[in-house]
Image: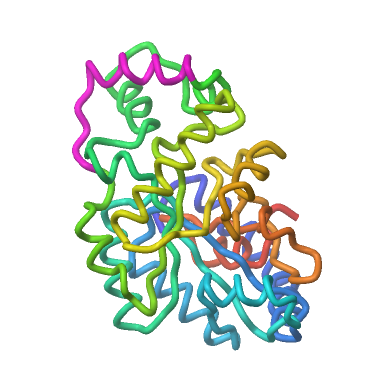
């Protein structure tokens, strides 16, 4: 945990929630087969992920792959007892350590890949905004850019890229290819450029989804039917396009557990766990009690 006021305050709040018994109540519901814990992160270290895995195993929780979740939802199976799924978004370069770690530990994980930074290098678009602010350039915050129409946001980022150089932030294609036949590491699509899909026109939205879909098939050698909405932003239009192109599962950022009989396969919730915060805070996040 990074020591700062935000994290210290969050740690204290989390400890109060843990003492109240709310997180443990969710864990017990999971062990009883009432729900599946659904968790995601971005650029977490293998040390911190291992800390979380060890805590969950100690609580009697084991882990399923995205393929197993798909089979459960497709075949309308009964809820399993004591299960969780962990996914990662974007395809950051240190995910290679996570991939090797999961292979060694025989632990299932799915990484949703934004393909352009992986194929062409450089940074994710929001990194240029953050770097510009660090440099003292006159830019708004990342959330402001997310609210722009996609064409306007793209123009702004093109201008920033002329001024700012960022070293590769994503994985390299060969790293993905090297794990394409893994029993423990799976991949999903997270669009080509990570736009806010509802801010795209329909042609651009479909292009972003399909370009990444085709690139992943090229890298992995098979169709990848799993998707995560960038920024968790989506609508009926995006769902219909995914169905049209035979995707099977799509993941949101709604912070709730999965209930097989109730959860829409194209609106699968996930609770975000964070890098550089306390285990206590992430325990609350894992169980979906952080916001309650």
Residue 11: image location, x then y, percent: 56, 58
204 is higher (above) or lower (below) than 66: above
Name the residue located 74 percent from the left edge and 76 percent from the top edge.
Answer: 76
- Whole-percent x, y for residue 121 in the image: 22, 39
**Residue 206 located within the stretch drawn in magenta:** no
Q: Say if 58 sits above or below 25 in the image.
A: below
As for residue 155 lying within the magenta part, the answer is yes
> Does residue 259 appear left or right of residue 38 in this picture?
right
* 266 shown above or below 27: above
Give the quadrant of residue 139: top left
- Report the magenta residues as a range: 151-168
Furthest-right residue in view?
262
Q: Residue at x 22, y 33 (%)?
A: 166
Residue at 55 percent across and 18 percent down: it is 149
Q: Is residue 108 left or right of residue 286?
A: left
Q: Residue 48: percent from the left, percent from the top? A: 39, 67
């Amino acid at each position: 945990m990074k020591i700062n006021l935000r994290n210290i305050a969050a740690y204290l709040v989390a400890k109060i929630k843990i003492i109240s018994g709310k997180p443990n109540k969710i864990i017990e519901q999971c062990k009883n087969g009432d729900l599946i814990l659904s968790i995601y992160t971005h650029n977490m270290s293998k040390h911190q992920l291992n800390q979380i895995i060890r805590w969950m195993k100690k609580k009697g929780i084991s882990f399923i792959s995205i393929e197993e979740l798909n089979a459960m939802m497709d075949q309308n199976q009964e809820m399993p007892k004591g299960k969780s799924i962990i996914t990662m978004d974007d395809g950051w370069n240190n995910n290679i350590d996570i991939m090797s770690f999961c292979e060694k530990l025989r632990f299932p994980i799915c990484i949703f890949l934004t393909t352009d930074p992986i194929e062409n290098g450089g940074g994710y678009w929001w990194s240029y905004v953050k770097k510009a602010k660090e440099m003292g350039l006159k830019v708004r915050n990342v959330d402001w850019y997310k609210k722009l129409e996609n064409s306007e946001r793209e123009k702004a980022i093109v201008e920033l890229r002329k001024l700012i150089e960022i070293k590769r932030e994503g994985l390299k294609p060969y790293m993905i290819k090297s794990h394409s036949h893994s029993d423990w590491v799976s991949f999903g699509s997270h669009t080509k450029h990570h736009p806010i899909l509802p801010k795209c026109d329909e042609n651009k939205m479909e292009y972003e989804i399909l370009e990444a879909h085709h690139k992943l098939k090229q890298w992995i050698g098979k169709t990848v039917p799993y998707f995560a909405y960038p920024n968790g932003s989506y609508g009926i239009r995006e769902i219909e396009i995914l169905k049209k192109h035979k995707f099977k599962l799509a993941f949101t950022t709604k912070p709730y557990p999965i209930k097989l009989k109730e959860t829409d396969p194209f609106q699968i919730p996930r609770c975000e766990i964070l890098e550089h915060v306390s285990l206590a805070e992430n325990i609350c996040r894992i169980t979906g009690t952080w916001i309650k």
